[in-house]
Image (cartoon, rainbow, N blue to C red):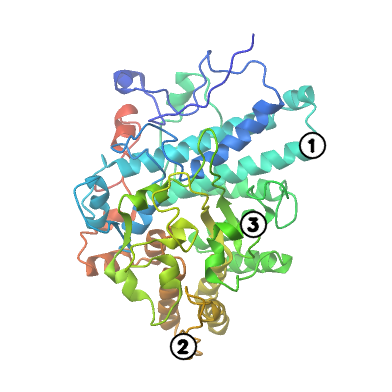
Amino acid sequence: MKAIYKILIPAALLFSAGCMKNLDRDPIGLLTPEQVNTDPQVGTVTGAVNSSYQMLANTLNLLGNWDWPRGLVLRNDFILQDIASGDMQKKWNPDGDQAWMDQFTSWSFTADNGGFNGQWSYDYEGISRSNLAISYLTDDALMSKLAIDNASRNYQLGQAYFLRAFYYFDLVNAFGDVPLLLKPLKNFSEADEVSKRVPKEEVYSQISADLAAAKGLIPAGKYSNNTDKWRVSQGAVLAMQAKVALFTQKWNEVVSIITELEGLGYYSLNANYFDNFSIAKKYTDNEVIFAYNHVPEQTPRNGNGICALAGWGFIAPTTNFVNEFETNDPRLLYTVDVTTQNVYKIFGEIGTTNKGNEDAASNKVYIRWADVLLWKAEAYNEMNSYANAVTYINKIRTRARQTPTITGGTIPAGSITDRPASNNKDEIKNWLVHERRVELGFESHRFYDLKRWGLAKTFLTGLGKSFQDKHYLYPIPQGEIDKSGGSITQNNGY
């Protein structure tokens, strides 16, 4: 009788014998004798790939049962990015519920804050699952035994490489140097060996290698699979390569990769801004490149749980965020309606059916075309190609002013006009900073933008936040340091 492998749900990445008493779960990736599948079948392999996507979901309680203190109820992107950046506040009517989230508003958190443990746990669990899939798919003997053809093998392997790169990209931007785990761990000794942080440059190198491998394995086409359109596509790989180049300031690469992507003709700006988020437009719009596919009425559940939080009064804009929008910009109401306290971008509809619905069908959009075009504008500006930078910013503004209002009308003439020609890099940068904020609001990009621009301290202290230089990196979760016996070190200042 074959043993059944169960995906581990860890609270910690690492292990040290000296602090074994502190562990309440096995480290990520550790395969115990009872959990090793001694006779993997085709379904085992495909299941490993499919499960690697799951840690991108906003589905509730994937890693615990209402474990708010450790930040495990759902992915914490909206906390570490939107609340931390001053765009979002925890609730419409602030209260003491989940006070640990408020610490991101005030920048008063410590390394014990559950938000960090949650993000770390989700990303490393995604990496662990990806590693398991990769270990199967790179085993020539297993592939031969299961008679998995090369096309299927390559496609699944490309997805796993992309996902591992995606999770590591999030980790390195949040925490800097992080442990690099590239295979399932067979014993505690192997877990102990990786209980150390490696330089972020090495992590970025691995991210780039994984994406390069994925590029050669994912089939061409806007969708890599016309049945499962949510899977990693050629466009998603190229977009992630461009994003890595952007965050490492390789401006020529950004332009080159996005030019390649433009040449494929897969994507364009939707005529209506809200089509990016509309449930009714899933996989028929022109712009979404990579998103997590939330599906209702599944067992186990696979809906968008963040809609439930909205029903409990969470997810509200700050006044500063609302004031950033120009007069008559239709993107504001499509994002959030202050009067009715509805966050339509998250609901995936202009209505309230999904407000409070933990099983909503609205997708979590990670990469879309407008985001990519603004990367290219930024790269052009850094390369002193000012006319090109302004052209790409104006593409986004044109779509904004041509988008129907939320009631179906048109915005008044003279609203959201094109930016004029300019040779002033700082002026164009300010235009870009504004455009990314209003175009991508509540999509969990803002804090990483402020960080890489070097604007986080100036902007957040200007809002009265206690942001300090140390905050350009988040703290390593204190529980991970404790459980590693100190082999994991803390970021400076925490």
Quadrant where the N terminus is found in the figure: top right
Residue 42 higher or lower than 88, as above or below: above
Label 3 to label 1: alpha-carbon separation: 27 Å
In-front residue for pair 327/152 = 327
Say whether disc 2 or disc 3 marks the residue closer to the N-terminus: 3
Quadrant where the C terminus is found in the figure: top left
Which quadrant of the structure image shows residue 288?
A: bottom right
Residue at which label 2 appears? 412
Q: Is residue 219 left or right of residue 188?
A: right
Residue at which label 3 appears? 283
Q: Is residue 222 left or right of residue 349?
A: right
Label 1 to label 2: alpha-carbon separation: 56 Å
Query: Residue 202: x and y, percent?
Result: 50, 45
Identity of the residue drawn at 79% across and 40% down: 151
Query: Residue 325: x and y, percent?
Result: 38, 76
Identity of the residue drawn at 35% across and 51% down: 311
Identity of the residue drawn at 40% across and 40% down: 120
